[in-house]
Image (tube, grey):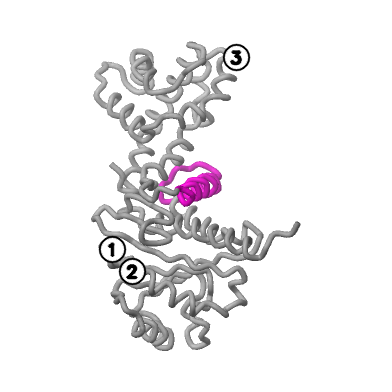
Amino acid sequence: MARSRRADAVVFGFDFQVNSAIVLFLENIKEVETLCLEGNCEDIELELSSGEMVLAQAKAVEKASSDFANVRKNIQKSLISLAEGEEKVNARELIMITNSPNPFNDDKSISAFYGHAHRKYDTLPPSAKKIVDDYLSKMDKKLDTDKFKIQVLPFETDDEAERYKVIMESINAFAGSLNTNISGIGQKLLETWHWQVFDNGGKKDVSIKLSKKDIIWPILVKITEIEQCEDSFLEQFDSGVYEEVINRYADIINSHCEQCEFFIKILSDYSGFESPKRGNEKLNQFIELKWTDYIADFDFDGIDEEIREAIIKIIIFNVIKRRFTIDRIKKEVNMC
């Protein structure tokens, strides 16, 4: 049975909303604290460290490059919704984000919205600004135009490479700024963040939000995965043990409820560890003396003690070996 066009439009719209949230999160990475889809006020809500909010209405058009029939209605609905949201919170920005390259269905202003455009109210072409002003004049609630922005995020077709092209560009630019030197990290983050944000959007409890640490955690996992461990360290483990560690490593490290805090704890412990040794000798000594301190941090039910020991030692080794990268990531995203 063919899917209904209405169902397709809903799925497409939510996909656009998820990806818009990812892009807005990255654009505010220094200040963002939490992300929420379908929040109390808007489609997308970002809470900033200042206590201010970024509110965004996501308006998707399936055939964005050719269908402009309802784009002005989208503008009108967004203005009404954003004005209502502004009454409830201290908003820094009020954004309508759309995939339409002609959000006003207006030949005079279409060139202003080419590509991944960001247009604040005071930079809108005169014809577009007039359309906004006309809608605002008919609204009961007022909207602060100094906070209003229209953002175009190209997003169209069933070809995933094309649909997610601009989102991938944003993710790759962000990943590049972290200088992790890990091949394919952008695609991995896209897949993981899709799942995280989609899952958040499906929560009925709007108080459940994604924290910055939740979203940055997959990066820390990627740079400390078992494949990043040095062969010289892995040689100490029996081949059978190593095979079992490979099977369980990712699940174990992701099972930790205080994920980022655990990495920070290891690095803090290592920083305070006094030893006359240096380099790898100090690291190996720390691991041998301290690995048992972290057993309680994981759920090891049903796992052999030898496997448990190997997993903890490899995690500690990878975290400490990549401490400078972890510190650089924390600074880049302004995460304590």
- What label sits on residue 234 in the rendered view? none
What SS does tag 3 mark?
helix
Instruction: Find disc 2 in the rendering and name its residue.
Output: 84
Magenta stretch: residue 180 in it? yes
Magenta stretch in the rendered image: 176-203
Identify the residue at horizontal 59%, vertical 15% (top origin): 239
- What label sits on residue 88 in the rendered view? 1
Q: Nearer the viewer, residue 167 or 235?
A: 167
93 in relation to 69, above or below = above
Question: Horizontal and vertical percent for residue 23?
Answer: 45, 58
Instruction: Find disc 3 in the rendering and name its residue.
Output: 240
Q: Image quarter for residue 246?
A: top right
Specify the quadrant that holds the C terminus. Answer: top left
Question: Horizontal and vertical percent for residue 50?
Answer: 24, 55
The Cα atoms of the two marked residues, 2 and 3, are separated by 61 Å
Identify the residue at horizontal 50%, vertical 57% (top origin): 19
- Mark 3: amino acid: Gly
- Upstream in sequence: badge 1 or badge 3: 1
Badge 1 density bin: few <14, some 14–19, many ≥20, Cα 10 Å: few
What SS does tag 1 mark?
helix
As drawn, is 95 to the left or to the right of 271? right
117 in relation to 191, above or below = below
Can you tell which of label 2 and label 3 is closer to the viewer?
A: 2
- Mark 1: amino acid: Lys
Magenta stretch: residue 189 in it? yes
Can you tell which of label 1 and label 3 is closer to the viewer?
A: 1
Q: Image quarter for residue 295?
A: top left
Q: Image quarter for residue 319?
A: top left
Question: Horizontal and vertical percent for residue 60?
Answer: 53, 67
